[in-house]
Image (spheres, helix red, strand yellow):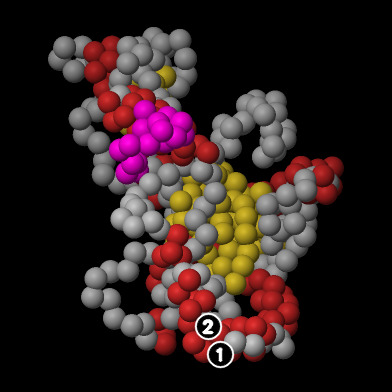
Amino acid sequence: MDAVHEPDNRPWIGEPMSPVVFRREWTEALKGEPQSDAQNVREAVKEVMNIPESVLKTLEADCSPSTLCCGEESMDVAKLPAHCDLLTLRLQREELQKREADEAYRMKTQQHFRKLCFLSKVNCNNKKQPGEVELHEEERMPSNEVLLVVQVFKPIKMPEGMKKVRLGSQTFFFKIQAELAMPSSLSLRCLREKITCISDAAVIGDFSENPDEISDERAVELYKSGFFYIGNTFYNDMSDRSCRDYSKVIINWAKDPKRKIGPFKTADMAETTLSDLKLRLGYPYVYVHQGYCEHLVVFSDMRVLHPHDSQRMSDYPMSLKTSFPSGKRVICMLCHQSSVKWVTYKNGRVPEDPFFSCDTCFRSYNYMADKKKIGKFRASPFLDWTTIV
């Protein structure tokens, strides 16, 4: 994989690092550091400035953030003063009025801001539920737990003849599907359970003979196999009796010395925690499921849990951000207006294979008035990323 991704030429890819080593070095770096609280800080200020307690209280009152407000000044940034000659406030008022009056402009502005705000939130926390009680010791995260931020990318379609795909490529638009906070004590199986993909929700089968009778069984219920490929090791999901070892085919294929890849190792993802791995921040690893659906997985950050993070073990893996730009919806190839609901294969009456169409065009073009099928083709329901995930 290093020959493909060339990590030495990618400054954003870090050196191999174990969460266990990271926690140990972080703990050692803090040894001997004085632990200060608010009272210790007050005592230190009094000693350095050589002032009594009464003067210190006066300083605290004078330097309080509340003194920055003038009288009944509003702290609401969206509520602008009624009488003000400042050009910046006048332009801001005009902008807010335009957004309120023009819905299309407001939606376009919101989409623009979403594209600019690509960073995840700093703190990992969920909204506290009303009436929530204090956590028991067994429900609380371990002290000095290491958190990793995991970015899961949407799969891309590989063009024929292309051998390399890089994250920095201008040919492909790699889009983040989800961003998760993952404690190092959890297994790769827990990470997989949190990854949502449209391929898992797809309906398997040919429904061209009777499109009104669609099965409720989803792909994830039929094909439960999958693996993570991290550091020349395939971490397979063998949690179900029906799971297959996807890596066997690849390992046998790589045994040919002419290919100059391997050797590879295998392990069970349910028995492997993130603390067992040596990870490179920024390096694109691989997650494969449904046989051919491949996602790039990048560990973008590693840090120690702090008091502002959620301390509840059950909150993790935690979704940090899911409002990434999802792209445009897939449009029917016949009417060029409605969203796609069906995809057909091996249909000789259309110019492309596969062919995507909305429900109305699909039924009117491929079936007679008595619902008899015209020609030979296979048909399956189509699920769009922009409308489902």
User: Where residue 307 sits: x, y (%)?
Assistant: 49, 75
Q: Between 162 and 120, which is closer to the camera in this rendering?
A: 120
Q: Residue at x 61, y 67 (%)?
A: 303
How many numbered dots are placed on residues in this image?
Answer: 2
| Vertical order, 233 against 252 (above or below) | below
Residue 63 colored magenta?
no
Residue 82 colored magenta?
yes
User: Where residue 343 sits: x, y (%)?
Assistant: 38, 25
Residue 165 seen by the camera: yes
User: Which label sits on residue 43?
Assistant: none
Looking at the image, the residue that sits furthest to the left is 370
| Vertical order, 374 against 31 (above or below) | above
Q: CA distance from mark 1 to mark 2?
A: 6 Å
Within-10-Å neighbours for mark 2: few <14, some 14–19, many 20+: some
- Identify the residue position indicated by label 2 in the image: 56
Mark 2 residue element? helix
Q: Residue at x 66, y 63 (%)?
A: 266
Mark 1 residue element? loop
- Identify the residue position indicated by label 1 in the image: 52
Relative placement, left or right, of 157 versus 61 is: right
Q: For the C terminus, which image quadrant?
A: top left
Q: Are marks 1 and 2 in contact (CB under 8 Å)?
A: yes
User: Where residue 251 sits: x, y (%)?
Assistant: 70, 52
To which quarter of the image does residue 214 belong?
top left
Relative placement, left or right, of 210 versus 148 is: left
Q: Residue at x 33, y 37 (%)?
A: 83
User: Where residue 377 sits: x, y (%)?
Assistant: 37, 20
Question: What's the amino acid at mark 1?
Answer: Pro
For the record, the magenta segment spans 78-94
Question: What's the amino acid at mark 2?
Answer: Leu
Q: Residue at x 72, y 35 (%)?
A: 164
